[in-house]
Amino acid sequence: MRIGPRLFAWGDRTYVMGIVNATPDSFSGDGLLADGDGVDRAVDQARRMVAEGADLLDIGGESTRPGHAPVDAAAETARVLPIVRAVRAALPGTPISIDTTKPEVAEAALAAGANLLNDVWGTAPDGAALAAVAATHRVPLILMHNRREPVYDDVVAEVVTDLAAAIERAVRVGMSPQGVIVDPGIGFGKTADQNVTLLRGLAALRSLGRPILLGTSRKSTLGRIVDLPPADRLEATLATTALGIVTGVDMIRVHDVQPNVRVARVADAIVRGTWRAEPPEGGHR
């Protein structure tokens, strides 16, 4: 799959998406607008993430944490556009994803240099607006699973079914299925127990035939397990990164790039066979 300036060869290795929160109220405390204008901070963060091994960056202008303050399209556009433009100018070889649910924001971000749409309401039964934008601009689309209420008989099977239906809706508005990435939506429309069950059953998403993005970084379910605040959930996130790769995840979306890149490289070496040790001089060890 081509995402902007780069080609992603799914199955060769795990790719890492760095999170750039252009918000004042991120759940993880890393919102770049908490103290006013954050363009310079966003560029510095983006440069650091790429230096640490991020393959692409996901820029979002509206928090998705429980109880977040909704923002309209104009306010969200005003937050993200200067950052998209600045990051694109600073890192022309790095693909940029825009995390939004609003077609107007998506259109503006694509015009400013974004290359991928990330729809956290990708499985809404009445919503294919972002898919239509992606189809028109011929850019890839992430469809994330979400529900208004965490009511399931079988969370794993229903997530797969909902994502399959979302792919069909996207295709009906002109999206190529080859341009779709699926995300199980850990932490969205699910209880903590359901999130853990879904993580245990991630391999079922392979039946969709599309690349899988996993976003567990600092999520509240991990906090429930280890009884720690967002800033102290790194090790818990790394555990899900490694275990997700075992089940066939293709990309991880994270706040802490360098440690996740290191875990992904080791997990890939074991699971995908991407690394071979050279025997030391004089024999084998």
Image: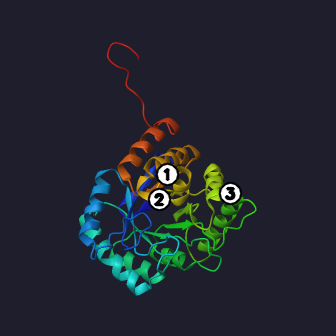
**Three-letter amino acid code of the residue under disc 2:** Met
**Looking at the image, is 156 positioned above or below residue 145?**
above
Q: Earlier in the sequence, mark 3 or mark 1?
A: 1
| 85, 136: nearer the viewer | 85
Quadrant assignment for the C terminus = top left
* Residue 164, position as x, y percentages in the image: 66, 65
What is the CA distance from the residue labelled 1 to the residue labelled 2?
8 Å
Q: Residue furthest right?
A: 153
Q: Residue at x 40, y 16 (%)?
A: 284
Q: Residue at x 50, y 44 (%)?
A: 242
**Three-letter amino acid code of the residue under disc 1:** Trp
Residue at which label 1 appears: 10
Label count reads 3
Question: What secondary structure is found at the residue carrying circle 3?
Answer: helix
**Residue 149 seen:** yes
How packed mark 1 is, by other alpha carbons closer than 10 Å (few <14, some 14-19, many 20 or more), is some
Question: What secondary structure is found at the residue carrying circle 2?
Answer: loop
**Three-letter amino acid code of the residue under disc 3:** Val
Question: In the drawing, does residue 54 fall left or right of residue 36?
Answer: right
Question: What secondary structure is found at the residue carrying circle 1?
Answer: loop
Q: Earlier in the sequence, mark 2 or mark 3?
A: 2
Residue at which label 3 appears: 156
CB within 8 Å, label 1 to label 2:
yes
CB within 8 Å, label 2 to label 3:
no
How packed mark 3 is, by other alpha carbons closer than 10 Å (few <14, some 14-19, many 20 or more), is many
**Looking at the image, is 12 positioned above or below residue 161?**
above
Residue at which label 2 appears: 1
Question: In the drawing, does residue 31 fall left or right of residue 13?
Answer: left
